Image (spheres, helix red, strand yellow):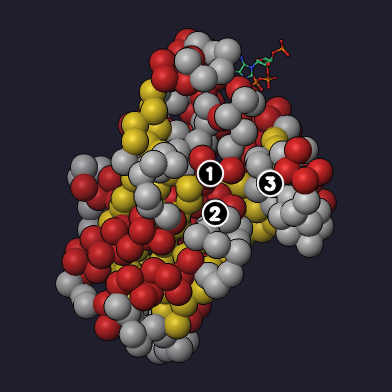
């Protein structure tokens, strides 16, 4: 049995169309100043309706890069996990389309529906399966094309989101590197504060549900904001406690990139300086389940975190779900 799962390689893919705040000013009544001051977002990369790409295409591109970084072939994978709530279709899972596109013929594949927390939820699962020896090599992906379910007339939500996939290949570790702790939590009593209620069995697809825009994102922004700060702080503390870490032991905080003010509030609570915090929300917006893995991939690429150092990932999202994990690179 392995001691834990470790990171073997990462990769990312982003939507091909860049949408700036000025572009959004032509769609809804907003300003660059409002968006930047309230969210920190300057531009996002989206999959436009003319781009002819679906979620599994982003997963496949990110997955190929992660496999190349790990020095592994698709046939080496035992499991593909995709955290997403904007899959290619209702069923089967986006993970199986990704499996087919990669040619990962030895893997099983399934999705995890935990909204923004999907990647860290998947990390807990992958770590457990690798520790017990049930799986050896897991491709874990967080991917979202949330702009496919944005109401482009709602200025309170349409300015927030971008489309991307981030991937990590995980394998067994027998040394000090790898997943030091995970923590996951949810509270379904607050589900209606951030959801897309239509098109399932709750409110079936009908002319009325379409007219009500039930299939699009509905969000109570203020409530989401308050809960995000509270829950990301809870998750951060829990992940540090479980790994026996203090904030001083964390070399890089990788928070969910939803909003710069949520990130700053989380840092402030633990005394994490912004220099020790990964921030790319200005360039990508909120990419939900992809946010943490694309930030991790960029942090490694930029040399913000090195082998042997500790990254702490913390996230909050629809459900509500929240989670954190300490990872020694
Ligand atoms: N441009 C200009 N004005 C706007 C815009 C916009 N894009 N959006 C909202 N407004 C207006 C509102 O209409 C409102 O005007 P009114 O007072 O005349 O009614 C005013 O700004 C204030 O609206 P609020 O919603 O109260 O603004 P708030 O300061 O809360 O900021 C925001 C809104 C940025 C959405 C904030 O609530 C937030 O960040 N919440 C967290 C949401 C989030 O990150 N969700 C992502 C999914 S969950 C996750 O990933 C954590």
Element on which disc 3 rests:
loop
Question: For the residue carrying disc 1, how many other residues have a C-alpha within 10 Å: few (<14), some (14-19), or many (20+)?
Answer: some
The answer to whether any part of residue 66 appears in the image is: no
**Residue 211 falls in image quadrant:** top right
> SS of the residue at dot 2?
loop
Which label sits in the foreground, 3 or 2? 3
Q: Residue at x 42, y 79 (%)?
A: 79
Residue 307 location, x and y as percent? 23, 58
| Residue at image mark 2 | 86
Q: Position of residue 24 (x, y in %)?
A: 47, 20
Q: Residue at 37% of width from left, 50% of height from top?
A: 52
Q: Name the residue beneath numbered marker 1.
A: 148
What secondary structure is found at the residue carrying circle 1?
A: helix
Q: Earlier in the sequence, mark 1 or mark 3?
A: 1
Answer whether residue 297 is visible to the viewer in this image. yes
- In three-dimensional space, the C-alpha distance between marks 3 and 2, rounded to whole angstroms, equals 11 Å
Residue at image point 25% right, 50% down: 300
Compared to residue 170, the image places residue 16 above or below, namely above
Foreground mark, 1 or 2, reads 1
Comparing 57 with 67, the one in front is 57
Q: State the residue in front, 142 or 120.
A: 142
């Amino acid at each position: 049995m392995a001691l834990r799962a470790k990171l073997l390689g990462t990769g990312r893919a982003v939507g091909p169309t860049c949408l700036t705040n000025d572009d959004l000013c032509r769609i809804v009544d907003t300003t660059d100043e409002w968006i930047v001051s309230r969210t920190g977002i300057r531009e996002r990369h989206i999959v436009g309706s003319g781009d002819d790409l679906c979620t599994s295409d982003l997963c496949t591109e990110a997955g190929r890069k992660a496999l190349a970084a790990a020095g592994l072939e698709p046939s080496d994978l035992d499991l593909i996990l995709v955290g997403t709530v904007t899959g290619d279709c209702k069923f089967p899972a986006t993970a199986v389309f990704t499996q087919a596109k990669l040619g990962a013929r030895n893997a099983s594949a399934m999705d995890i529906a935990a909204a923004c927390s999907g990647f860290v939820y998947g990390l807990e699962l992958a770590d457990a399966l690798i520790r017990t020896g049930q799986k050896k090599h897991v491709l874990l992906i967080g991917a979202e094309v949330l702009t496919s379910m944005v109401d482009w007339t709602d200025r309170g939500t349409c300015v927030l989101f971008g489309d991307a996939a981030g991937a990590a290949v995980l394998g067994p570790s027998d040394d000090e590197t790898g997943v030091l702790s995970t923590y996951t939590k949810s509270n379904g009593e607050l589900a209606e504060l951030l959801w897309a209620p239509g098109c399932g069995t709750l409110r079936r697809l009908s002319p009325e549900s379409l007219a009500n825009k039930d299939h699009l994102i509905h969000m109570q922004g203020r409530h989401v904001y308050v809960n995000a700060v509270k829950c990301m702080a809870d998750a951060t503390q829990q992940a540090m406690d479980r790994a026996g870490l203090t904030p001083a032991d964390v070399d890089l905080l990788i928070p969910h990139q939803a909003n710069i003010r949520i990130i700053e509030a989380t840092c402030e609570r633990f005394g994490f300086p912004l220099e020790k915090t990964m921030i790319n929300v200005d360039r990508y917006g909120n990419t939900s389940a992809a946010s943490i893995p694309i930030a991790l991939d960029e942090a490694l690429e930029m040399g913000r975190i090195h082998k042997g150092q500790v990254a702490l990932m913390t996230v909050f999202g629809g459900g509500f779900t929240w989670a954190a994990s300490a990872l020694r690179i």
